[in-house]
Image (cartoon, coloured by chain):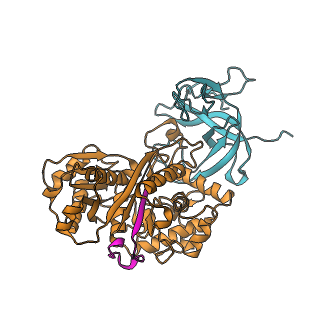
Chain colours: A cyan, B orange
């Protein structure tokens, strides 16, 4: 979790995608949607289930850890993207079945392996035009405690 | 349904032509096809125009470049499958009896650089939703799962660039080695430059008509449309494979309409936007099994001289990929091949051929059209 500096405001890249901890002991989580008709879980939240098209969806708190499905270091400049290349991006697979595309942090590509256990962090992704920190989700490797 | 003949085809070179206004690029392809068909612009009764990058009413702007005949013009944005879409619509207009002569054109003039998502989203801003990372991760998984090796994917680029050398319209005419592919600029690990198709400008046109009209302008045997299909996404979880399932479904529908199977095909033009895509779509189209496609590529089964040539034109990888023009350019190649006019790219006496494009942000749209002689 990034430090909050008094001068710089922080905003999420979009409302409703994740919840920041309200106390130091808590951790952030992603908010997805679960279809009450077929059980399909999606992130980001949807209005209609992409599997069965039902509109009967509810918000769900998603697991904070996930398995690394794939990853790559993007080396070219990406139009629209506010992150500077090179940057590390990947897919992580949640226990709920959904596959989430994400920035990867606190690691380098050489040390990562498909199948690694990863955990969610909410972190600054970029600064907008007014210098405000824009927060987004990232995953970092779960490290064994000594 | 009436029998529909592909009477004429034409295309511009694919490349970068910022100094040429896109309506002229489109008009040049049309004039080429009209000459090829032995028709005049006033003979065309309806035009279907595919484009994504150049704004509204591109078809009408192309028409204005040649001359106002007042025909109906339909503009289509179906991303990489726009060309297959306009061809299918032109075919259906003639087959269904509404129009006797129809024209399908794909025209595109593209900005430089890698494509991001079609609509800017938080994921676009975060840099996590783009074609290059998606296909890089596809490659990583294919290697991890022992489906394809990096060499087998690079071989697709070597083959298609070699074919491009024999295509006067090709954006690239480069005889690449495996080392050239491996050592080219790293885009997103392990995707290097020559694993990717280029962006660029160009247009391609096909003119379709009834058999009765064809007999007035050409002699048999005619190239006819055996059938075609267009689909959008069926649900599949996880995004990595969505371009595969839609391709399988669209091809199967086209085979059923055409009354043939993949074993009946003599040659194929498919959506090789990245090298891994060619291997995947060869399997998706039913040409071979997943566990043999890499080995068959190594053995030359898909070369010009192989059992079933794939991407004879140089494919998207070498010939280029002006998004909406590609599908119709594939049709051009199949027609030239089936007329015996493909020069050094000529495959052996093709009678049945298939074109396939799969596009959109994440395989949202797929078009397949089958020709026969």
Residue at horizontal 61%, vertical 32%? A40
Residue at horizontal 54%, vertical 52%? B244
Which image quarter: residue B334? Answer: bottom left
Give the left or right position of residue A1, taking residue B246 as reference. Answer: right
The residue at the far top in this view is A22
* Range shown magenta: B337-356
Query: Where is B233 relative to B187, above or below?
Result: above
Q: Give how far across and how far down residue B5 sits, in percent.
A: 28, 62
Query: Where is A84 relative to B350, above or below?
Result: above
Residue B71 seen in render:
yes
Instruction: From the viewer's side, name the closer residue of B246 and B124.
Output: B246
Which image quarter: residue B103? Answer: bottom left
Instruction: From the viewer's side, name the closer residue of A108 and B252.
Output: B252
Instruction: From the viewer's side, name the closer residue of B307 and B259.
Output: B259
The residue at the far right in this view is A146
Query: Where is A65 relative to B229, above or below?
Result: above
Give the left or right position of residue B123, taking residue A114 as reference. Answer: left
Residue at horizontal 47%, vertical 66%? B264
Residue B357 seen in render:
no
Q: Give how far across and how far down residue B60 sits, in percent.
A: 20, 47
Q: Give how far across and how far down residue B84 sits, in percent.
A: 37, 54
Give the left or right position of residue B366, taking residue A134 as reference. Answer: left
- Magenta stretch encompasses residue B347: yes
- Magenta stretch encompasses residue B123: no
Count of numbered circles on the image: 0
Residue at horizontal 12%, vertical 51%? B69
- Image quadrant in which the C terminus of chain B is located: bottom left
Q: Give how far across and how far down residue B262 sits, in percent.
A: 49, 63
Give the left or right position of residue A86, taking residue B359 as reference. Answer: right
């Amino acid at each position: 979790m990034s430090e909050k500096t008094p001068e710089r405001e922080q905003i999420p890249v979009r409302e409703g995608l994740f919840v920041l901890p309200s106390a130091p002991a808590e951790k952030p989580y992603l908010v997805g949607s679960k279809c009450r008709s077929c059980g399909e879980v999606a992130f980001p939240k949807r209005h209609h289930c992409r599997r069965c098209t039902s509109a009967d969806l509810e918000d769900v708190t998603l697991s904070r850890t996930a398995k690394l499905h794939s990853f790559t270091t993007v080396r070219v400049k990406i139009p629209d993207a506010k992150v500077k290349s090179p940057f590390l991006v990947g897919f992580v697979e949640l226990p709920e079945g959904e596959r989430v595309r994400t920035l990867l942090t606190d690691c380098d590509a050489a040390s990562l392996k498909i199948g690694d256990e990863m955990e969610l962090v909410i972190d600054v992704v970029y600064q907008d035009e007014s210098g405000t920190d824009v927060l987004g989700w990232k995953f970092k490797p779960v490290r064994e405690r000594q | 349904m009436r029998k529909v003949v592909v009477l004429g085809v034409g295309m511009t070179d694919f490349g970068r032509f910022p100094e040429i206004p896109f309506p002229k690029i489109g008009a040049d392809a049309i004039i080429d096809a009209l000459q090829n068909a032995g028709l005049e612009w006033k003979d065309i009764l309806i035009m279907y125009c595919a484009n994504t990058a150049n704004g509204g009413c591109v078809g009408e702007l192309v028409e204005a470049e040649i001359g106002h005949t007042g025909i109906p013009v339909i503009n289509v944005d179906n991303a990489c499958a726009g060309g297959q879409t306009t061809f299918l619509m032109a075919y259906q207009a003639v087959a269904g009896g509404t129009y006797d002569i129809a024209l399908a054109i794909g025209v595109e003039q593209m900005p430089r650089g890698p494509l991001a998502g079609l609509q800017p989203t938080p994921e676009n801003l975060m840099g996590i939703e783009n074609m290059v990372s998606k296909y890089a991760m596809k490659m990583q998984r294919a290697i991890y799962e022992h489906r394809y090796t990096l060499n087998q994917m690079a071989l697709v680029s070597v083959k298609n660039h070699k074919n491009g050398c024999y295509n006067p319209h090709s954006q690239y005419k480069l005889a690449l080695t495996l080392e050239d592919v491996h050592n080219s600029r790293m885009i997103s690990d392990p995707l290097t430059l020559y694993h990717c198709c280029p962006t660029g400008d160009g247009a391609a046109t096909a003119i379709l008509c009834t058999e009765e009209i064809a007999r007035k302008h050409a002699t048999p045997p005619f190239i006819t449309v055996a059938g075609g299909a267009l689909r959008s996404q069926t649900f599949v979880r996880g995004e990595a494979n969505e371009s595969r399932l839609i391709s399988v479904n669209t091809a199967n529908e086209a085979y059923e309409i055409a009354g043939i199977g993949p074993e009946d095909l003599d040659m194929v033009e498919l959506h090789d936007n990245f090298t891994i895509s060619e291997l995947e779509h060869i399997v998706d189209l039913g040409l071979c099994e997943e566990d043999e496609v890499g080995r068959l590529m190594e053995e030359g089964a898909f070369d010009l001289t192989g059992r079933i040539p794939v991407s004879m034109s140089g494919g998207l990888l070498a010939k280029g990929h002006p998004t909406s023009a590609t599908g119709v350019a594939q049709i051009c190649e199949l027609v030239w091949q089936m007329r015996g006019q493909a020069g050094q790219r000529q495959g052996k006496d093709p009678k049945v051929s298939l074109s396939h494009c799969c596009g959109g942000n994440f395989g949202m749209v797929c078009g397949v059209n089958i020709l026969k002689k």
